[in-house]
Amino acid sequence: MTEEIQQPVEAASVVTATPVLADVPEEAQKKRFNKSARPQRGGGGRGGRGGNSRRPGAEVPAESDYEEKNIEVARVTRVTKGGKRMRFRVLSVIGNHKGRAGFGLAKGLDVAAATSKATTKARKSLITLPLVNETIPHAVEAKFAAARIILKPAPKGTGVKAGGPVRSVLELAGVPNVSAKILGSKNKVNNVKAVFKALRLLSSPVKANGQTESPESQSGAGQSVAV
């Protein structure tokens, strides 16, 4: 008797289940099956991103061969309505010793944060120096605020004859032989800005026909100017 009762119940359940599937639109069924069949992204962290999804060289900066140097680290304060706010100011200079250099000035809550900001600014302000016979092509003078800088070419074997922040900038830029003089203010920030202003004024030697002369053809002229 129990078997006869169970069989009609199962048949009724089958009959009632088929209309439910039939009422579902085909588009909804396709979407449901597509979602279930879609492959899941690699896990391992929040957001579904895997740990090995990044490229191997994505974290390496483009200017990894540049050397960084902090010229000045100062503690500055600003008086506000609630009291004094203390920050750190860092003047950073970077260079690749191959004719490219840049500087950055930034503030931060600590020295590390200020250095990171200053280095980022320095990478965005890189300039290229025209070098002839391992020195600058001509003498140049620049002035920024109360600081005044004079740069003169020097013969081979002279080295970098400069002091203060000017020496650090020229060494990081990769100028083998040069003579420099700081006139006026001794403020390191103004002196660095004056040096880069002078370096931007440098231009490669140009022939009469308008073409830029190569360093090899200027071997005699560069030594005569330096003397």
Image (tube, rainbow, N blue to C red):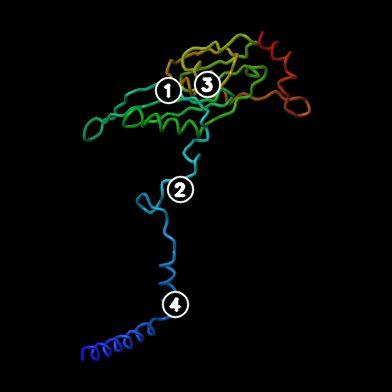
Q: Position of residue 154 (x, y in %)?
A: 62, 11
Q: Position of residue 190 (x, y in %)?
A: 45, 22
Which residue has dot 1 on it? 70
Which is in the foreground here, disc 2 or disc 1?
2
CA separation, marks 4 and 2?
34 Å
Label whose residue precedes the other's in the sequence (1 or 4): 4
Q: Quadrant of the N terminus?
A: bottom left
Q: Quadrant of the C terminus?
A: top right
Report the disc number at residue 53: 2
Which residue has dot 4 on it? 27
Which is in the foreground here, disc 1 or disc 4?
4
Which residue has dot 3 on it? 172
Label whose residue precedes the other's in the sequence (3 or 1): 1
Do callouts 4 and 3 mark residues in contact (Cβ within 8 Å)? Answer: no
Per the image, label 2 sits on a secondary structure element best described as: loop
Residue type of the residue flagged with mark 1: Asn
Label whose residue precedes the other's in the sequence (4 or 2): 4
Report the disc number at residue 119: none
Per the image, label 1 sits on a secondary structure element best described as: strand
Q: Quadrant of residue 219?
A: top right
CA separation, marks 4 and 3?
66 Å
CA separation, marks 1 and 4?
64 Å
44 or 139, nearer to the observer: 44
